Amino acid sequence: MRGAAAGAGPVCSLKTPPSQEDYFRLYRKIVWTILRYARYWSYLDERPRHYTAMLADYLTRHRQMALVSGPRQVGKTTTCKSVSDEYLNWDNADDGRLLLQGPASIAQALQLDVLRATPPIATLDELHKYTKWKSLLKGFVDSYERVRLIITGSSRIDIFRRGGDSLMGRYFLYRMHPWSVAESLRTDLPQKEIHTPEEVRSAEWEALWEHGGFPEPFLRCCDSNC
């Protein structure tokens, strides 16, 4: 590189190995990031959505799959994992290879040969990215009844499932929306049709107004009272 700018410091060679000080500086940044967001992560895990109770109730009473769609970052994975015993993600290379092996391998991974008091609940995340996902699910649910499945994906899963009727009668579709005023007041299943009006906490109202209802900015703002 010719003519470095006046006053510029020495140019570091890409071949120079990192020093112990560089590693320590990186380590401090990682620890600082973890500590900064740890409180928010635990808060997000501890606060259930209305869909948590909805899915748990549905899977207790029905054997059909629950297809959960919705925009990115709306909380699908966090919510579905909270009610699941097992979790497989198509985007994970190991899980993807397992899913490609077919229903028998999936059943073995989910330990469906183990006797349980209630059927296990398994979430298959981003499965719609597999071109033959509907055929895979049809073969699996027709062969193994002692399991309850949640299939998650983006909004496109609602479009993909209309491309044929191979899953007809084998699922119920849920669409997740961002946090709402009603969900701020109550996340359990309604016990009656009409409830007494309640006042929304000012911090949650301000968070919804300023940042919208997507869980990450909404809950972070509520937790810090921003």
Image (cartoon, helix red, strand yellow):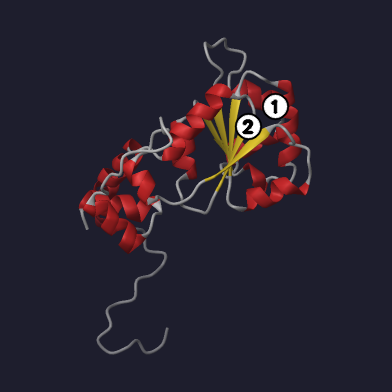
- The residue shown at (59%, 44%) is 126
Q: Is residue 39 visible?
A: yes
**Residue 186 spot, x, y in % from top left:** 35, 39
Q: Secondary structure at mark 2?
A: strand
Q: Quadrant of residue 9?
A: bottom left
Q: How many marks?
A: 2
**Residue 31 spot, x, y in % from top left:** 26, 48
Q: Quadrant of residue 147?
A: top right
Q: Residues within 10 Å of mark 1 (few under 14, many from 20)?
A: some
What is the C-alpha distance between the residues marked 2 and 1? Answer: 8 Å
- The residue shown at (41%, 64%) is 15
Q: Quadrant of residue 124?
A: top right
Identify the amino acid type marked 2: Met
Q: Secondary structure at mark 1?
A: helix
Q: Which residue is mark 2?
A: 65
Mark 2 / mark 1, whichever is N-terminal: 2
Q: Which label sits on residue 141? A: 1
* Image side of residue 154 versus residue 38, left or right: right
**Residue 21 spot, x, y in % from top left:** 24, 56
- The residue shown at (68%, 52%) is 159
- The residue shown at (53%, 23%) is 60
Identify which residue, 34 or 43, lies in the foreground: 43
Q: Residues within 10 Å of mark 2 (few under 14, many from 20)?
A: many
Vertical comparison of 80 with 130: above or below: above
Check whether the beta carbons of the residues at disc 2 and disc 1 lie within 8 A of each other.
yes
Vertical comparison of 105 with 129: above or below: above
Quadrant location, the N terminus: bottom left
Identify which residue, 38 or 165, lies in the foreground: 165
